[in-house]
Amino acid sequence: MKNLKAEIKNILLRHEGQAQAIKSKELCLLLTLPDRQVRLLIRELRSDGLPVLSSGEGYYMPSNWDELRECLASMRSRLIEDALTRRDIKVYGERYLTPAEQGRLI
């Protein structure tokens, strides 16, 4: 059985800098894996200490501090946006699913 984590790590180490990013679809084809498994392997690599960055261009290793900071800022922005969306769905979902109390007597 092949070591998929080592394979994907070796591929990513050859893609340094956002300009050299590799698309998820390409990783899936190279490793003959579904997208979900590729994402899980990348999460494992990050947990193991490999700072794999991502953008609309794909996955890549940072080539400088600016790329690292840019990726972190993008992630923070998405977290904030996701938190606001979650809050709105919770509040308005509860209102939507709670029937109006019409004609309630004291």
Image (cartoon, rainbow, N blue to C red):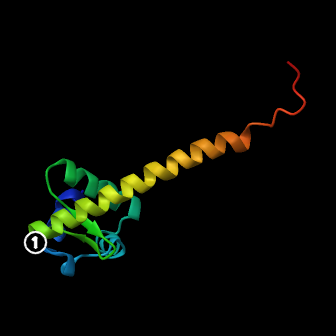
Q: Position of residue 8 (x, y in %)?
A: 21, 64
Residue appearing at x 33%, y 61% in the figure:
38
Q: Which residue is mark 1?
A: 63
Residue 4 in sight here: yes
What is the secondary structure assignment of the residue under circle 1?
Answer: loop
Residue 64's place in the image compared with 86, above or below, is below
Q: Residues within 10 Å of mark 1 (few under 14, many from 20)?
A: some
Residue 16, image quadrant: bottom left
Residue appearing at x 21%, y 57% in the figure:
5
Image quadrant in which the N terminus is located: bottom left
Q: Amino acid at mark 1?
A: Ser
Residue appearing at x 32%, y 54% in the figure:
40
Residue 2, image quadrant: bottom left
The one nearer the camera, 53 or 4, is 53
The one nearer the camera, 90 or 49, is 90
The one nearer the camera, 14 or 106, is 106
Image quadrant in which the C terminus is located: top right
Taking the view exactly as shown, the residue that stands out farthest to the front is: 106
